[in-house]
């Protein structure tokens, strides 16, 4: 499945869907499938200011730990607590019900991010 | 052997609840032969090889001259003057070179078993799955015993042993027979192929050591809790003096921990005191699939902190998370000690 065209992607496999000065952030389908065995997700508290490219949380799998990095700067306005308790939506609907954060005051350089088609090419290369 | 065939958690739980099949052909299988092979193995290993009768297996250590370890191994007596030694994959070449360097003075033959591979079938259904493929009743094969068996018509060594804490078998067969035996063991649908990831979490729940983590070339094996396989009374062996000298020095002790809150403390994370100073190190850490993914692990800590019931703190990416020192194994062992 091609990645959606209505959002931007990082090389560390987060997505951001920007709507004006607010945005939602999540983990891509590619990443969720690569991690496979999520046992624990740690997300920031509402109100925290995120820096672009810096870790805002972690995903722990049985085998390893993965940082979650902020695609752009912003302030955490909401956290998907449901996903922290039950990872099912993250795997079944990573671009919808599996969202992780909603941000406000989103700023930063979008040119460092990829669109869906570029991200799919990036994953195909990384996979080889 | 892949890290996993699918998600690790289900592979782990399938082994605990039904059966898991492991391709452990990467492990080294070494044959030692000659009239003085007992003497040779007594000098090169820490356990007392003279206690082994035919078909008896023994967990043991292969020490270096400084009292640290080349490896941890399993020694089996096939017959008088004939032994079968299984060593860790990553140490096979070095172990073999070490043994070959010592072999001439004992006049023994040491050789890697060519074109031979190893499978492990582990879990409560193991015997039911394996029985139809072998020629004699497995019920009479006791824990840590091995015998020659015909498996699907192929000559094999079958032992009741493993690295998971479950009842189960290890099956040494010619490589040419491996695919057929592998497929037949899976054919009934009760056993699931299991990879290295679950092999690690299964052994960690049993607090079994892993070379390169709990033990290595420097670590004194007494501190790793392996005094039970060191038999100084049997006579001299490589590294005996420095190993015994370090036995009673107050050093770090290996302890099992369980994080109080959610999280995972992984290999290499620091154990810290109240001021944040580094006082120890996690050697293996993972979520425990059997314990609802609680963060469990093994860590070297000062002897004063190693008692069960104590509390330590582990630096988990900048946060000091509390962990309780707990009794190991973390889950009860189900190995079948009695036939």
Image: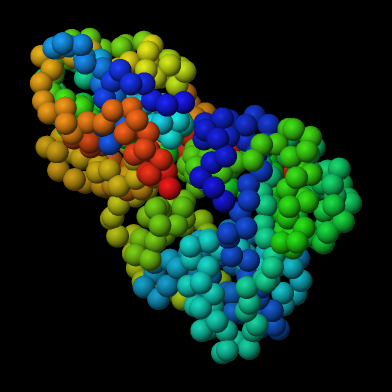
With B84 as the anchor, is B43 left or right in this view?
Answer: left
Residue A127 in picture, x, y percent from top left: 42, 43
With B19 as the anchor, is B61 left or right in this view?
Answer: left
Q: Is residue A113 above or below residue A98?
A: below
Residue B339 in picture, x, y percent from top left: 77, 43
Q: Is residue B219 above or below residue B83?
A: above
B80 vs B17, nearest the viewer: B17
The answer to which quarter of the image holds residue B192 is top right
The answer to which quarter of the image holds residue A48 is top left
A24 vs B323, nearest the viewer: A24
With B24 as the anchor, is B294 left or right in this view?
Answer: left
Residue located at (37% from left, 17% from top): A95
Residue located at (34% from left, 45% from top): B267
Residue B81 in picture, x, y percent from top left: 72, 77
Q: Is residue B137 above or below residue B291?
A: below
The answer to which quarter of the image holds residue B38 is bottom right
Q: How is the image coloured?
A: rainbow
Whether residue B247 is visible:
no
Residue located at (28% from left, 20% from top): A7
Residue B64 in picture, x, y percent from top left: 42, 72
């Amino acid at each position: 499945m091609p990645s959606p065209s209505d959002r931007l992607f990082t090389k560390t496999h987060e997505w951001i869907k920007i709507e004006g000065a607010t945005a939602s952030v999540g983990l891509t389908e590619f990443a969720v499938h690569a991690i496979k065995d999520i046992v624990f997700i740690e997300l920031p508290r509402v109100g925290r200011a995120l820096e672009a490219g810096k870790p805002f949380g972690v995903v722990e799998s049985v085998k390893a730990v993965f940082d979650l990095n902020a695609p752009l700067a912003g302030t955490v306005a909401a956290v998907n607590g449901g996903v922290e308790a039950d990872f099912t939506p993250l795997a079944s609907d990573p671009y919808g019900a599996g969202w992780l954060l909603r941000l406000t005051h989103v700023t930063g350089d979008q040119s460092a991010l990829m669109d869906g088609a570029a991200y799919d090419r990036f994953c195909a290369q990384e996979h080889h | 052997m892949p890290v996993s065939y699918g998600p690790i958690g289900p592979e782990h739980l399938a082994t605990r609840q039904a059966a898991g099949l492991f391709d452990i052909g990467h492990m080294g299988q070494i044959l030692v032969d000659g009239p003085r092979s007992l003497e040779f193995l007594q000098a090169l290993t820490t356990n007392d090889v003279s206690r082994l009768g035919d078909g008896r297996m023994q967990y043991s250590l292969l020490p270096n001259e400084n009292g640290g370890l080349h490896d941890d191994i399993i020694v089996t007596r096939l017959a008088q003057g004939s032994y079968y030694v299984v060593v860790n994959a990553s140490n096979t070449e070095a172990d073999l070179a070490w043994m070959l360097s010592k072999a001439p003075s004992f006049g023994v033959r040491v050789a890697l078993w060519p074109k031979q591979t190893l499978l492990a079938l582990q879990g409560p259904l193991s015997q039911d799955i394996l029985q139809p493929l072998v020629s004699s009743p497995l019920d009479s094969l006791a824990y840590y015993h091995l015998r020659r068996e015909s498996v699907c018509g192929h000559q094999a060594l079958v032992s009741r042993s493993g690295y998971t804490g479950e009842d189960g078998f290890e099956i040494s067969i010619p490589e040419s027979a491996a695919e057929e035996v592998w497929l037949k063991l899976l054919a009934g649908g009760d056993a699931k192929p299991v990879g290295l990831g679950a092999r690690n979490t299964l052994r960690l729940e049993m607090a079994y050591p892993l070379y390169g983590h709990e033990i290595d070339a420097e670590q004194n094996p007494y501190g790793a809790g392996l005094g039970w396989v060191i038999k100084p009374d049997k006579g001299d062996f490589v590294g005996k003096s420095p190993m015994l000298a370090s036995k009673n020095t107050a050093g770090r002790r290996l302890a099992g921990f369980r994080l109080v809150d959610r999280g995972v403390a992984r290999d290499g994370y620091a154990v810290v005191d109240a001021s944040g100073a580094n006082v120890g190190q996690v050697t293996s850490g993972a979520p425990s699939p059997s314990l609802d993914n609680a963060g469990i692990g093994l860590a070297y800590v000062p002897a004063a902190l190693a008692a069960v019931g104590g509390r330590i703190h582990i630096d988990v990416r900048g946060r000091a998370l509390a962990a309780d020192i707990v009794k190991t194994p973390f889950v009860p062992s189900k190995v079948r000690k009695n036939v």
